[in-house]
C-alpha cells in the first residue's frame, strides 16, 4: 500500500529516484476528488475510504488514510502548519526538453515561487505557497514537514537526513527526530497518506475531509464537511473507519454508507459494519447511525 521512504546518498547530497506516472482518468479536471481519480481492481465504484489513527504518546498521534490527494490534504494541514514547509523525497514526473527530470527548485521556479534550496531536491517555502506547489504535482512519492523558522542549509539537510532514516512504516516516528515540527506527511501516488501530528484535531479533520469528499463524489454535488463533534464521537468509539462504495446507496437524495471499524482490507475481507454514515444532501445534515 505504501512504499517506504526512498533513501540514497550521492556525493554527500540527497539523490531521489523518480518514476514515470501513467495518466489517470480525470487528471485534467481539478474539480474531481481522489476517490474518482483512482480505481482498484475488484472494488467497483469509487475508491475505498480508509482511516486509522493511533495515539503515539503525549501530544503525538499518527494516521494512515486514503484516498486523499495533496491538493485535498493541504485544505487541512495548512491550518495547523507552522510558517515554513520543507518538501523532499519527491519522485515526480516533470521532465525538461532533454528528458532529464526537473529538480524541485526548477519546478518551484516554473511556478514563480521563491524558495530556499539546501539541495536541488530539498526545498523550503512559506506555508502560504505550499498549495500552489503541490497542486498538479502528481508525484509518486513525497515527504514534508513544517518548521517555525527557515533554518540554514546544513541544519535543514541534517533534519531531512534524520527524517529519511526513520522507518515510519515499522512504527518509528519522524516527529521524534525533528524538534519543532508540528506535523510530518508522506504521500504515495497522490492518494495514500501517512501523517504524524502534535494535534488531535488536525488528524480528525483529515477524516472529516475524507468523508466530505467521498460524499461529494458519490452525490456529484458539493457538500459541507461533517461536524467535528460527530466525527469526534465516532473516534471516541473506534480508531478506524473504512467505507466500500459498492455497499453504499443513495435513496431520495440521502447517502447511506455502512462503515467498518477497521482499515480497508486489500485482501477482499469485508468486516461487518459498525455504523451507517448518512448525509441528507438537500438538508445538509450528517448523522451516524450506530449498529453496534
Image (cartoon, rainbow, N blue to C red):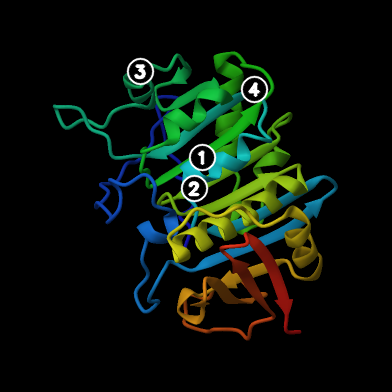
SS for callout 2: strand
Give whichever of discs 1 and 2 has the lower sequence position: 1
Give whichever of discs 3 and 4 has the lower sequence position: 4
Residue 63 picture quarter: bottom right
Q: Which mark's residue is nearer the viewer, 4 or 2?
A: 4
Residue at the disc numbered 4: 83
SS for callout 1: strand
Residue at left offset 55%, top offset 72%: 255
Residue at left offset 73%, top offset 66%: 239
Q: Which mark's residue is nearer the viewer, 4 or 1?
A: 4
The alpha-carbon separation of the residues under discs 3 and 2 comes to: 22 Å
Instruction: For the residues labelled 3 and 4, say whether their Cβ atoms are less than 8 Å apart.
Output: no
How far across and how far down the image is residue 221, in percent?
46, 57
Instruction: For the residues labelled 4 and 2, say whether their Cβ atoms are less than 8 Å apart.
Output: no
Residue at left offset 43%, top offset 53%: 33
Residue at left offset 55%, top offset 32%: 161
Instruction: For the residues labelled 1 and 2, say whether their Cβ atoms are less than 8 Å apart.
Output: yes
Q: Return the mark for residue 187.
A: 2
Whether residue 277 can be seen here: yes
Query: Label 4: how many residues lie within 10 Å, few (<14), some (14-19) or many (20+)?
Result: some
Residue at the disc numbered 3: 109
Amino acid at each position: 500500500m505504501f512504499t517506504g521512504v526512498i533513501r540514497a546518498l550521492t556525493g554527500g547530497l540527497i539523490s531521489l529516484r523518480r518514476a514515470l506516472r501513467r495518466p489517470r482518468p480525470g487528471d485534467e479536471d481539478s474539480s474531481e476528488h481522489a476517490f474518482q481519480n483512482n480505481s482498484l481492481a475488484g472494488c467497483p465504484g469509487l475508491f475505498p475510504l480508509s482511516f486509522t489513527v493511533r495515539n503515539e504518546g503525549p501530544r503525538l498521534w499518527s494516521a494512515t488514510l486514503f484516498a486523499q490527494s495533496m491538493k485535498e490534504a493541504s485544505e487541512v494541514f495548512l491550518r495547523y502548519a507552522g510558517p515554513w514547509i520543507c518538501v523532499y523525497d519527491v519522485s515526480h514526473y516533470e521532465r525538461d526538453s532533454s528528458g532529464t527530470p526537473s529538480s524541485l527548485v526548477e519546478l518551484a521556479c516554473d511556478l514563480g515561487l521563491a524558495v530556499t534550496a539546501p539541495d536541488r531536491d530539498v526545498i523550503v517555502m512559506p506555508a502560504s505557497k505550499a498549495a500552489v506547489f503541490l497542486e498538479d504535482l502528481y508525484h509518486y512519492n513525497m515527504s514534508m514537514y513544517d518548521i517555525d523558522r527557515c533554518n540554514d542549509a546544513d541544519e535543514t539537510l541534517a533534519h531531512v537526513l534524520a527524517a529519511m532514516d526513520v522507518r515510519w512504516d515499522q512504527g518509528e516516528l519522524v516527529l521524534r527526530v525533528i524538534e519543532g515540527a508540528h506535523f510530518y506527511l508522506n504521500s504515495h501516488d497522490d492518494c495514500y497518506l501517512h501523517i504524524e501530528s502534535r494535534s488531535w484535531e488536525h488528524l480528525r479533520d483529515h477524516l472529516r475531509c475524507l468523508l466530505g469528499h467521498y460524499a461529494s463524489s458519490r452525490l456529484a454535488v458539493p457538500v459541507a464537511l461533517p461536524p467535528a463533534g460527530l466525527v469526534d464521537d465516532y473516534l471516541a468509539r473506534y480508531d478506524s473507519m473504512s467505507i466500500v462504495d459498492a455497499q453504499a446507496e443513495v435513496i431520495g437524495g440521502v447517502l447511506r454508507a455502512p462503515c467498518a471499524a477497521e482499515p480497508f482490507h486489500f485482501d477482499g475481507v469485508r468486516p461487518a459494519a459498525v455504523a451507517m454514515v448518512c448525509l441528507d444532501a438537500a438538508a445538509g445534515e450528517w448523522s451516524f447511525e450506530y449498529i453496534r
